[in-house]
Amino acid sequence: MGSPAPDDLDGSAWVLTRARGFGVPPGVAVTARFEGGRVGGSAGVNRYGAPVQVAGSTLTVGDALTTCMAGPPDAMRTEQAYLAALAAVRTWDLDPSGVLVLADGGGRPLLEFAPEPATPAGEYEVTGYLDAARDAFVGVLDGTRITLALTPDGDVRGHAGCNRFGGTYTHDGPAIVLGPLATTRAHCPQPDGVMEQERVFLAALAATTRFEREAGTVTLFDGGGRATVRARAR
């Protein structure tokens, strides 16, 4: 394996495919995004973030902070094992196939990652969105469903809870612009709040300027770094 350049990792995103001493259960995504001297992503159940130092082929990860959600026992065991392995990493390299290999001080591979897809294309079920007026990220109303589909050729469509919407999008690396979007004109009286949810969700889409894609999920952000929409692959 060749010696990587110090800045090759910055701005890159990866999904864990193999680990020493533990597996990743089906449906569990473990990811790593390197940006601005930090690494973060999904540890399996919780989000994590930690400082990272890269110098040539050496790499060390500082103390990780995580959210505090509980999950299935097998996913929680994977998360604990992953964070422990990440703390033990001392070197990194890219193998000839483009796999990121993180190894311990003795050169033993601990974690192997494949690159995350560089496109937002996919079909998604929305799990939450930004209510900008309340400065709050909120879940989808019970009894409603919001979907989002981004095609490889630049079309966007979906269901906003009552009406269907559609339009186009463009992206350049992680930058993305959605719309303008057109909607159907139905009015849904039930459940309470569905029309307000639709209005707020479409406004969140319109405010989006950047996306991050991880295994099984896509998160959209506004120019201030706030998450505008989070969705899981269908």
Image: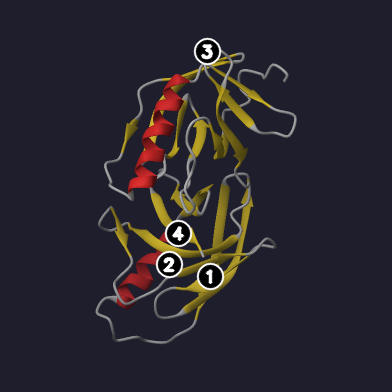
User: Which mark, residue 231?
Assistant: 4
Depicted 84 relative to depicted 153: above or below: above
Per the image, label 2 sits on a secondary structure element best described as: helix
Eye-nearest disc, 1 or 4: 4
Q: What residue is disc 3 on?
A: 105
- Residue type at tag 4: Ala
Q: Residues within 10 Å of mark 1 (few under 14, many from 20)?
A: some
Residue sitting at x 33%, y 70%: 197
In percent of width and height, residue 100 lies at: 62, 30
Q: Tell me which corner region of the image, top left, top right, bottom left or bottom right, holds residue 102.
A: top right
Q: CA distance from mark 3 to mark 4?
A: 38 Å
Q: CA distance from mark 1 to mark 4?
A: 18 Å
Q: Tell me which corner region of the image, top left, top right, bottom left or bottom right, holds residue 178.
A: bottom right
In percent of width and height, residue 155 lies at: 63, 67
Disc nearer the start of the sequence (3/4): 3
- Residue type at tag 2: Leu
Disc nearer the start of the sequence (1/4): 1
Per the image, label 3 sits on a secondary structure element best described as: loop
Q: Are marks 2 and 1 in contact (CB under 8 Å)?
A: yes
Q: CA distance from mark 2 to mark 4?
A: 14 Å
Instruction: Tell me if residue 45 can be seen.
Output: no
User: Which mark, residue 202?
Assistant: 2
- Residue type at tag 1: Leu
Instruction: Tell me if residue 132 can be seen.
Output: yes
Per the image, label 1 sits on a secondary structure element best described as: strand
Q: What residue is disc 1 on?
A: 181
